[in-house]
């Protein structure tokens, strides 16, 4: 699917949802255009899934052109560079896209009912978008993305084999299997960059990525 086709379809989805099923608690923002997927080359080795581009500061949203702001230097780009390095992948070989590519009036983490209601059409587009990369491994960023795809009870810590008693991992890492999610693909859940402040994720990131690399 061409980037131009993704953009046009995102616009159609946004406009249809705005007309037929917008929510007053967090309306779709029609003043900003959908954000494009991030890709440098066509030689892809890793797909990264985010949720949506609605960052906290409204003024900052106007500067976002590509998914996760990966065309700019920032803490998230540093994090994903680390991920790529651990997997033996060059940053230039990633493809990043959001499940929802348009903006809301405010970050929807506290109004998850809104994006859950808007998920079907966006997920249909996402599946079509990724269908031309059937063998490229996928990582998801953050708990909200995981729960959109795998259900409200899904936890990143589960796939990292978190032991509540020891507050450590037992090392039996897992990916989210195709049969257990709405994406229709296996994927590897990662915490979003701010969650690396938590000791568990910070201490076990390399080990989880080692597990991922061994299963690619």
Image: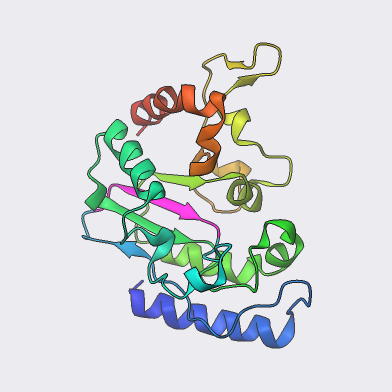
The furthest residue to the top: 166
> Residue 21 in magenta?
no
Quadrant, the N terminus: bottom left
Q: Position of residue 6 (x, y in %)?
A: 42, 75
Q: Position of residue 137 (x, y in %)?
A: 38, 44
On the picture, is 34 further left or further right than 168?
left
Q: Position of residue 139 (x, y in %)?
A: 45, 44
Answer yes or no: is residue 9 visible: yes
Nearer the observer, 149 or 29: 29
Residue under the point 31% across and 31% down = 86
Residue under the point 42% across and 22% down = 207
Q: Magenta part mainly helix, strand or loop? A: strand
Nearer the observer, 72 or 103: 72
Q: Position of residue 31 (x, y in %)?
A: 55, 85
On the picture, is 83 further left or further right than 26?
left
Residue under the point 57% across and 69% down = 122
> Residue 50 in magenta?
yes
Q: Which colour assignment does the render follow?
A: rainbow
Answer yes or no: is residue 131 visible: no
Quadrant, the C terminus: top left
Q: How many numbered circles does the render carry?
A: 0
Q: Which residues are magenta?
A: 44-51
On the picture, is 181 further left or further right than 153?
left
Nearer the observer, 166 or 158: 166
């Amino acid at each position: 699917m061409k980037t131009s086709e993704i953009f046009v379809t995102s616009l159609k989805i946004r406009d249809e949802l705005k007309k037929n099923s917008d929510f007053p608690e967090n309306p779709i923002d029609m003043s900003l255009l959908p954000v494009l997927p991030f890709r440098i080359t066509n030689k892809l080795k890793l797909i990264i899934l985010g949720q949506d581009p609605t960052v906290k500061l409204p003024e900052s949203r106007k500067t976002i052109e590509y998914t996760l702001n990966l065309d700019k230097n920032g803490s998230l780009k540093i994090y994903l560079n680390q991920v790529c390095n651990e997997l033996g992948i060059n940053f230039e070989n990633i493809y990043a896209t959001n499940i929802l590519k348009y903006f809301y009036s405010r970050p929807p983490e506290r109004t998850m009912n809104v994006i859950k209601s808007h998920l079907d059409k966006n997920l249909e587009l996402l599946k079509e978008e990724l269908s031309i990369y059937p063998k490229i491994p996928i990582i998801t960023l953050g708990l909200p993305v995981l729960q959109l795809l795998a259900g409200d009870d899904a936890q990143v810590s589960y796939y990292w084999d978190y032991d509540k008693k020891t507050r450590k991992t037992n090392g039996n890492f897992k990916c989210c299997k195709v049969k257990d999610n709405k994406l229709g693909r296996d994927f590897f859940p990662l915490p979003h960059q701010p969650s690396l402040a938590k000791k568990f994720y910070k201490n076990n990131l390399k080990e989880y990525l080692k597990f991922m690399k061994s299963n690619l």
